[in-house]
Amino acid sequence: MNSNRKNQKNKERKNPYPSLFLINRFPSGRHGKVVYIRPEYHERLLRIVQVSREDKATLYSLIDNILEHHFKEFGEDIIDYYNKQNKPIF
């Protein structure tokens, strides 16, 4: 393994954010839905994506990765909350 790859692996261990969220797994075509976010969040997210030019992350992929992580992290809590709020009819 060359030293550049070792350095990158060490950086990822110290700060997992790029490897979790700045990964583009989607084609450039838009197949999602439009969603509105606060202007200040939009500005922050764009700036984060622009830093990752080498990885070619997109705003769409960043938001999708954040949501995927959120649902993995809190999925059971969300399901429990939903089930408590929506009692069965019978």
Image (cartoon, helix red, strand yellow):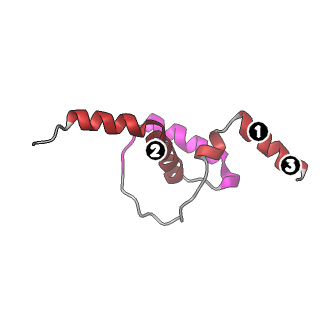
Residue in the image at 88% along x and 53% along y: 1
- Which residue position is annotated with label 1? 11
Left or right: residue 89 versus residue 9 is left
Residue 5 image point, x, y percent: 83, 50
Left or right: residue 55 versus residue 80 is right
Residue in the image at 61% along x and 48% along y: 22
Q: Image quarter for residue 34?
A: bottom left
Q: Amino acid at mark 1?
A: Lys
Mark 1 secondary-structure assignment: helix
Point out which mark residue 4 bears: 3
- Which residue position is annotated with label 2? 67
Give the mark nearer the N terminus: 3 vs 1: 3
Q: Image quarter for residue 8?
A: top right
Q: Quadrant of the C terminus?
A: top left
Give the mark nearer the N terminus: 2 vs 1: 1
* Residue occupying the far left of the picture: 90
Residue 54 image point, x, y percent: 70, 53
Point out which mark residue 44 bears: none
Q: Nearer the viewer, residue 64 or 69?
A: 69
Q: Amino acid at mark 2?
A: Leu
Give the mark nearer the N terminus: 3 vs 2: 3
Magenta region includes residue 39? yes
Q: Which residues are magenta?
A: 35-55
Examine the rendered structure and indicate whether residue 69 appears above or below residue 28: above
Residue 13 image point, x, y percent: 73, 37
Residue in the image at 48% along x and 50% along y: 64
- The majority secondary structure of the magenta stretch comes to helix
Disc 2 crowd rating (10 Å Cα; few below 14, some 14-19, many 20+) is few
